[in-house]
Every structure is written in C-alpha cells, then in structure tokens.
Amino acid sequence: MHIPKYPLLALLALAACRSAGPTAKSATTYSANPHMAAVTPSSSPVKYPETRKSDQVDDYHGTSVADPYRWLEDLDSPETKAWVEAQNKLTFGYLEKIPFRDQIRERLTNIWNYERYGVPQVEDGQLYFSKNDGLQNQAVLYVQKNAPQSLPEVLLDPNKFSTDGTTALTGTYFSNDHRYMAYSTSGGGSDWLKVKVLDIKTRLPLKDELEWVKVSGVAWAKDGFYYSRYAAPKSGENQLAGKNEFHKVYYHKLGTPQKTDKLVYEDKKMPLGFRFAGTTEDERFLVLSLTDGVADGNRLAVRDLTDPKQADKFTTLISSYEHNNSVVGNVGGKLLVLTNYQAPLYRLVLIDPKKPQQANWKTVLPETTYKIDNVEHVGGRLIATYLKDASSQVKVYSETGEFQNDVELPAIGTAAGFGGRRDAKEVYYAFTSFTYPTTIYKYDLATKQSTIFQAPKVEVKPDDYLTTQVFYSSKDGTKIPMFIVHKKGLKLDGKNPTYLYGYGGFDISLTPSFSVARMLWLENGECWPWLICAVAASTARPGTKPV
C-alpha cells in the first residue's frame, strides 16, 4: 500500500540547438531527411493577434504586482474565446504550409499504431490490465484468468464512456474480498473525478456514483471505502476555473447516496493542501497523507480501525510537512514507511503507532549512495527499486530487510511495477528504454526469473541505434549523467543537428523511456542526446545524488 504525494504540475523545459545552420539574416531551413523537401517560412514577420493589456494590479503585502492578462482567466468570456480562435487560426495556418507535414503525420500514424499494455494487477486468480490496440483514444481494461492459454475479455471500454472518446479511466481499486472494483473517470482532461463501482462477479455497475472528487484514490474498508473530495461548486460557478479549498476525507458505504457519506477528516484552519486516505491490505490501519500547499512534503497520521478507542482520532506518525513520507505496508501492528527524513536518498523504516517517536523507529532498508525510488511490500517480501545514474536497479529483501537477490533487467533503462498482495507468488513489471519499447514482464518470486508477458511489435528497428551514457560536470563540479542516442555509424563530429532535452524540479527524474516521436527523429539520421540533470538549476530530482 502506498499513500502517494501530489506535487505541483511539472513544467517541462525544452531546448533545441544546431551546431551548423543558416546565418542570423537568412531564412530558417529545415530538412527532415533527403526525401523531404525543405521548408522556408516567409521572411515577413508573423503578425500575431493583438492581446489586450488591462490595468489590473494586485497588492501583495505592500508590493504591487501587475497582472495585465488576468482577463484571459475567464474561459467563458466572448473576448477570451475570440482570442483563442484567432491564435488557432494563425498557428494552424502556418503549420499547414509546411510541405512535408503530411509525410510526418503519416509516418507517425504508422509507427504509433502498435499494441501497448499496462502492468497487470492480480486479483483472486484473475489478471486485470489495460491495452491500447494502437490508435485508440483510450486504453481498454481487460480481464483474463491467470493461467496459460487463457484469453482476455473486455471489462471496461473508456472509448464508450463518452461520444467524443475524451473520458478517461484514471484509476481502478479492488476490494480486498475481490468482489468489487471501484473506478474513477475524468472527462475532457479535467482534474475532477467521478467514482463508480462495478460488481466483479456479475460485471454489472452498482448505483453508487460519487462526484466532486479530486486528488483522491479509493481505500476499501469493510462494506465501503474512503475517498477525498471538495465541496460542490456554487451555482453558476465555472467548475474548471473555481478555487478549490478545504479538501476533505469521507467514508462511503456501498448502496447509500453520496450525501450520507461520513466526514472522516477536515482541517478548518488550512484551506490549501490535500488530504489523502489509504488503508493497509488487512484493513487494520487508515492512513492520512496531509500536505499544506506550501512545503514539498507531507505529514502522516494513522488510525487503528480495530481499536474502538481510536474511532474518532488519529495518531500522528510524522508531523513535519518538509519531508516525503509514504506507507508501504504493515507488519503486524507496525507500519513500513518510506521517508527522506534525515535521509535525502530515502530509507525504509518500521514505525510502531503506539510509540511513533523518531527515537523508536527501526531502519529496515537504510539510505545508500543510490536513491530508493520505490518499495513494494508483496508476497512476504520487499521489492525496492533504486535509481542509479538515472536508470533502475531492482533488489528483493525479506520483510525485515535482509537482502535476497537482484532482479535482472534486460538492459539499462527504467523498470516500474512489482506491486501485488501479501500472498502473491508472482508480480508484473514494465521495462523500457530509449530504443526499447515498453515490455511487460512476469517475475516469479520463487524462481527469481523474469519472463515476457507482452512485448509490443513496433514498426521500428531498435537494433539500428546506439545508446551511450556519459557524464559531464555541472557548475559546482557535480557529475551529471547524460544519455546520447543516435543511429549506429553516425559520425559524432559536432555537426549533427542535436535535440538537447533536460528537465528540473518537482521531485521528478527523467529516466530512459521509449518515444515514437523520438524514433521518427532518430530514423531520419539525427543525433539525440538526452540530458538527465541532478542539480538545482536544471535538475532531474532535487535530492538525487549523482555518483
């Protein structure tokens, strides 16, 4: 079980450069490959639609801050709609003049048209997984028996949730008795979620439907579940533009209307931040992950659901908002917590809710020179994924932290998954790299062997490309890992068009992954260096220590 944190929306930074090209006075020329004609945009300047500047000024603690484009925040105003329409007309009018644009679209369509699988979840002898046939708007949720030669059946098809195919399946949550599956959907890219419930045995939906859910999972306990929501928008208020305050945790009992849901937690003094609920697999503990909307971390609080004395109170495990903390599972009456408190690269500790003081913590997996990216408590084991030089290493430990074995991965790349229940005999994970399409593996906990569950068939030739990892020095001398991907045989003489990509902030690392769009670039002879930074100015992950 994990209680995830929800960082601010990450902003991507992209930089492109060419070592050889036209002079500043000449028109830009681009040639995708010898078979594509060059495009030379008109030398006359682009005339952008006029954007009105207002005299809006706000006073923040005595400091005046101008906000001349505040009017654009009114998404429904005729002026904003007209501005968007004018911008689109200009943009698409320009793009339509590119002579090889249709060729790019056709090639991308061809290579994007391949089956893509999600990591399966095992529930009561059944496999649940997502699959996109290639060009579907939304991946479809399938179920099949966890046995050789079994065939998958469609359980939910999000492409049929709405007429335009923009309603997405955003989460699935199985009850611990394997009878029900709660699932969340979002429409048109909105952050608002709706939660519904499916009877797994009958394949029929229940009448339960929860609205105004946001930044929430579903945590099952007895005959219902915990979830988080905001108050419904006021009448006439734009639900996409309204301000969200006072996030609350509720308990929903199956078969009852949402208006009767029991309020479990709120903080009337803190309008910002999120309150996220989770339960341990044995449904003994209810765990709250609390953020304040300011600091990067989260507090942890717990309630023993088997103790009548704690029916209306929580015990604080970690009180500071300055560190990231998540509950991985529980061993008896104690909780396994992944934390970066006094361990920038994370450690796994065992905390007794009856004696939660830091002096009583027991270290299960200590901090090492490599960051612990994730820990799963599954099959009576701990499976830890480490980040070494921006790529994955996976190790298996006992519940008390004794090392058992490494999980052998097919190459340098990114592995994710390994989740499951306490009685699991096998787990599934996804592996990907720059020229290695995401492949799903099954890992047998007893034999310690991985076998391919699903491998995609992509219309590209990964063996035609080479990936190398190099290191360079940042301003303070820190060694930064960087991957360089290019066609085999390409002469690296500094004259190749180069796409340099870096990212920094919000506790997010860029690790090797497969991209169809990047393959289009690569197969046309370009050199693609992928920049993985780990320093504050252009970092991959604050706290990630390069070695």
Image: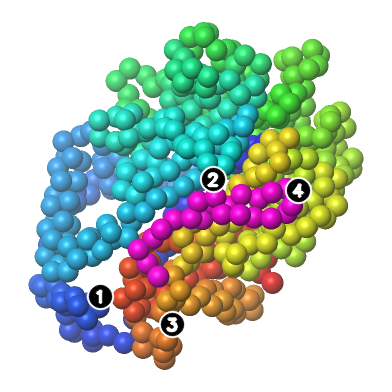
Location of mark 3 (residue): 488
Horizontal side, residue 387 vs residue 130: left or right: right
If you read the primary sequence from the N terminus, does the residue marked by circle 1 or circle 3 appear first?
A: 1
The amino acid at mark 4 is Ala
- Find the magenta span and give its range: 439-461
How far is the residue under mark 1 from the one under mark 2? 35 Å
Q: Is residue 288 above or below residue 64?
A: above
Which residue is tagged 4? 446
Q: Position of residue 235 (x, y in %)?
A: 33, 17
Give percent across and percent down for residue 415: 59, 56
In 3D space, how far apart are the residues under numbered discs 4 and 2 (Cα atoms)? Answer: 20 Å
In terms of depth relative to the viewer, which is nearer, 343 or 205?
205
Q: Quick one: label 1 or label 2, which is nearer the N terminus?
A: 1
Q: Amino acid at mark 3?
A: Lys
Looking at marks 4 and 1 on the same chain, the residue that comes earlier in the sequence is marked by 1
Give the image location of residue 54, x and y in percent. Answer: 24, 45
Q: Is residue 417 above or below residue 174?
A: below
Q: Nearer the viewer, mark 4 or mark 3?
A: 4
Give the residue type that dot 1 points to.
Answer: Ala
Look at mark 1 in the image and give the residue it sits on.
32
As measured in the structure, the alpha-carbon distance from the residue carrying label 4 to the one carrying label 1 is 50 Å
Residue nearer the viewer, 38 or 378: 378
Q: Quadrant of residue 399?
A: top right
Q: Residues within 10 Å of mark 2 (few under 14, many from 20)?
A: many
User: Could you tell me the amino acid type at mark 2?
Assistant: Val
Residue with the mark numbered 2: 119
Which of pointers 4 and 3 lies earlier in the amino acid sequence? 4
